[in-house]
Image (cartoon, grey):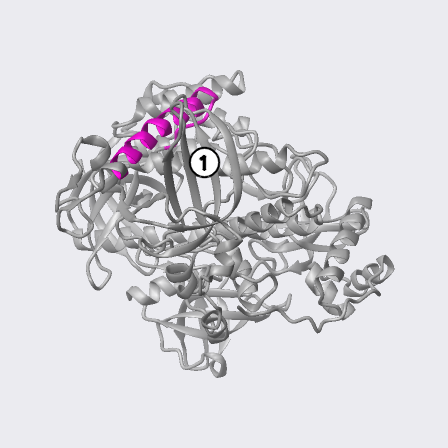
Amino acid sequence: MAKKSRNKKINTSVTEEGVVNVFRNARDRALTYKQVAAVLGTSDASSRNRIIKIISKLRGSGSLIEVERGLYKQTPPKNYHVGRLEVTSRGKGYVIVDGFEEDVFIRPKYLNTGMHGDSVEIYLFKRRKQDKLEGEITKIIQRKRTEFVGVITLSEKFAFVECMGYNLYTDFFVPLAKINNAKDGEKVVVELVSWEAQNDSPIARVVKVLGPPGDHQTEIHAILAKYGLPYEFPKAIEDFASNIDTRITKHECAKRRDFRDILTFTIDPRDAKDFDDALSFETLENNVVRVGIHIADVSHYLTPNSLLDQEAYDRATSVYLVDRVVPMLPEILSNDACSLKPNEEKLTFSAVFDINDQSEVIHQWFGRTVIYSQLRLAYEEAQYIIETDQETIPAEVSITNQSRSIDSKMCVAIRTLNVLAQQLRQKRMKQGAISFDKLEVKFKLDHQNNPVGVYFKESKDANKLIEEFMLLANRSVAEFIGKKSPKQTFLYRIHDQPDDEKLAGLQQIIKRFGYSIDTQTKERTSQSLNKLLKDVAGTKEQNMIDTLTIRSMSKAIYTTNNIGHYGLAFDYYTHFTSPIRRYPDVMVHRLLQHYLDGGKSPSNDVYEAQCRHSSDQEQLASNAERDSIKYMQVKFMADHQDQEFEGVISGVTDWGVYVEINQNKCEGMVRMQDLRDDHYVFNKDEYAVIGSRTHRTYRLGDTVRIRVKKADLARRHLDFLMVD
């Protein structure tokens, strides 16, 4: 196993005065703690931790402000404020300033080169007659991004690049010397070089040519580039991973609790390539069973602060696009050493529970283990065992495409665990958990990654079996550390209560379909949301209302400051069960072992910064995954040009009506100009567009018939026409 370098000397010269001077000299620039460390000439962990503590103290005293997650600068003088700029598609700006009850409006002429997402300094005007805060951007503190994906257009003397999806109000100007051999009409990645206040457009250079728009590889790489996500590992990382000693020695096994002789198996999707969790099952006395939840011990191989560890931290999560996975870890770990394959010894980190027949945990244990999985099952196979009394899985269900016999003890274990899982789920629901079983759309792809069909992924008992025991492990680990006194630094997965305004908006929409929610108390809210989700199941409006309900919820994030998980109705919750694909789980493993070894609580600020990074990367990955689904929807519908479908109006705006096709859940838009039988006006209060002459109304939730007008792969957009 690779060893980390011990040659770095700890810099003891880090002082509060020194940190203050760094920010003072930086003037307009916002800095991360790593940049401060670089200026001070220090790189060891001890000095970085001290810098984080000093920054936290200065922020608490008001000397510094956090302009964006992990970015700090000196507090500006009076009438000058710092915030995050949001730009609308029409070029209007709004700056969100911490502590302000309303956003600051920025007229287009006062944007002063600010772009969507930038951290900016603004000068606040006096309130105008319309009682609205207005301001002017005076400085760009930190660009949200410096690389953009767009289509290049060449002319005789210069080129320009049009970038979609960034809320930009201008194109990029590219000198011909900086086009990097790009051809007219190709998709490219451009890097912002400069943007002087007197210029209408920023100057950029082409850093990567992706290829022709509409080409599959071009579009997938464009999605990854848009969110700054890598699609391969650097050679240095691959070489480092290849040199890790992945042998499982007798010496290492002797240090761990041995489960190799215990009945153990995995249940995963049919097409899974990495298996990061396994279950073991033992029958004890008095109707008690011992359930082991065994998780790949990634932290055993991932040395802290190593080259590979830094790469995994930077990525923070695996990204699941429609046609591929962009992994957090190289294949030698994710698909080999850490993957809990059948008939192989594996190192694991486990949560072991003794559970009675009422699904009550009467004893628990956490620690490092070694296992030997006897069987790999797909969800469909486990479901067959649960639903029948058979021990032979037929060929049409089997992952081997041949019938196979399952040991009777294994079948008993699966059925017993299913009963316990159902009891655990019932308890969660009674405690106020919300059941989000949203319909998940999947594409059948041919060997060239072309979509040839659509199917809907359904969560059955086998899926819920695994889900409940993973939830049990995650909750129990969080409680084990979170309830200790004095408080110890730990990483939690939190989910705040829904926003009242969003719930009110949801109420307004669903009442048009005859539904309602009771938001008087936390308990009533969760109960009525569950009833709503149950009532809409199987209806034409299900997918739309499921989506709107999820949007009314707060986002779950990682933090060291626990407030519980509203959606799961847990007071303590963390992520422990997927370290192959989530870096926070690796952090949880390390902290848990640290405390099991009697270690003292480390710096809370350091871990909070890492939590913010992990939450941000998770959001980027989610956006990329959503874009890839939208792209595949458009690609699928390209073969259905001029065909008619029945759908539900899923959104109404002043530029058009969105329609979701019932048959495949693909969503497109009927533009206002294509509603040619009348002049239609958007009515926000009615969630509708209404004809001025005929009073014909297209309202949210209405069933309509549409024809596919155009499938634009490059813009990932579907255009529909209404059919009378």
- Count of picture labels: 1
Q: Is residue 596 left or right of residue 363?
A: right
Q: Is residue 368 visible?
A: yes
Q: Position of residue 94 (x, y in %)?
A: 60, 46
> Which residue is farthest bottom?
177
Element marked by disc 1? helix
Instruction: Check disc 1 and give the amino acid type.
Output: Leu
Give the prevailing secondary structure in the magenta stretch.
Answer: helix
Residue 165, located in which quarter of the rendered image?
bottom left
Q: Position of residue 381 (x, y in %)?
A: 22, 42
Query: For residue 564: magenta?
Result: no
Q: Is residue 181 left or right of residue 84?
A: left
> Viewer-proximal residue, 167 or 209?
209
Dot 1: within a 10 Å radius of its alpha carbon, few (fewer than 14), some, or many (20 or more) residues?
Answer: many
Residue 60, located in which quarter of the rendered image?
top right
Provide the residue span drawn in magenta: 410-436
> Viewer-proximal residue, 505 or 159?
505
Q: Is residue 315 visible?
A: no
Q: Which residue is mark 1?
A: 471
What is the quadrant of the C terminus in the image? top left
